[in-house]
Amino acid sequence: MIKNMEIVIGIPAYNEEKNIARIIAEISKKGYSVIVCNDCSTDSTKLISEKMGAIVINHSKNLGYGAGIRSIFQKAKEMNFDILVTFDADGQHRIEDLENVINPIIEKDADIVLGSRFLKSNSKNVPKYREIGIKAITKLTNVSINEKITDSQSGFRAYNKKVLDSINPSEHGMGVSTEILIKASKQEFKIFEVPIEILYDGDTSTHNPISHGTSVIFSTMKFTAIEHPLKFYGIPGIILLTVGLFFIVWTIQEFSLSRQIITNLALIGTGATIVGTMLLITSIILYSLVNVVREKNTT
């Protein structure tokens, strides 16, 4: 292994008998160990992976991409690997890019390395609709992390031992990619990007772009709400409360002039004030609870 580091390539797989043998064979030629998380495939993914000598984790039911990443994290940590590289099983990642993704961790320049499809001119192979969606999700992710990255949804990543020991993914769906970045940024792990080339042969991705995008958006919102409750709930709360008070004052002014209550103004004012107040209270309560939990975890 490179510089005496134990490196493992983790592959979440669901019905990937078409590509899995070639991928495992090519990775093994480079001297890396391989973990395959078989997410209850109905084809020969499990059998092929076992015959090819991979460490195979089998889910008893189909749990999703995020659950596969979680199982791979746990197995890599359990087996005390120094570096984990996650690698998609659909044939879109190039084996030749492995060293480029691993080297920044070997050289201690990063804790997490992302293989980006959008550095330099590598995005030419990405279908346009996917490029637009990925870039939109990445902009949303960048709001919640310290670094500004170009490809938050890349499944081609490397993690050092500190990250494996510190981060425990919980998302079962595609939102796991964003979850890991948010948790890593919170713990001030250094995130680095390197360019990779993606191989889209008629768009072979098994991830539905609509469900992928929805999963990531809700995941990002959830973790932003937990990590930054004052920002997530407080700012909308202040805006709604301000709007509500404006309409209430307007309603009072109209009543003082005409002795009539304008129902629409009154309803908007009352509703916005109530919702805004509730959001502000929620932000304060959640902020207090999060800080109490953090203090308990550090003692």
Image: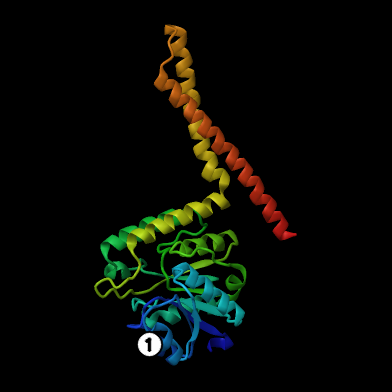
Which residue shows up at 35% across the image and 66% down it?
118
Q: Find residue 206 and report its horizontal and vertical position in percent.
A: 34, 70
Q: Find residue 246 and report its horizontal and vertical position in percent.
A: 47, 23
Q: Find residue 186 and report its horizontal and vertical position in percent.
A: 58, 59
Q: Above or below — where is 280 with respect to 155?
A: above
Q: Quadrant of residue 173?
A: bottom left
Q: Secondary structure at mark 1?
A: helix
Q: Which residue is mark 1?
A: 21
In the shown orientation, is residue 238 left or right of residue 119? right
Regarding residue 203, the answer to whether it shows in the image is yes
Which residue shows up at 37% across the image and 55% down it?
136
Residue lying furthest right in this view?
A: 299
In the shown orientation, is residue 31 left or right of residue 214? right
Which residue shows up at 61% across the image and 46% down it?
286
Q: Above or below — where is 113 with respect to 20?
A: above
In the shown orientation, is residue 19 left or right of residue 256? left
Q: Find residue 196 and report its horizontal and vertical position in percent.
A: 37, 74
- The number of numbered badges drawn on the structure is 1
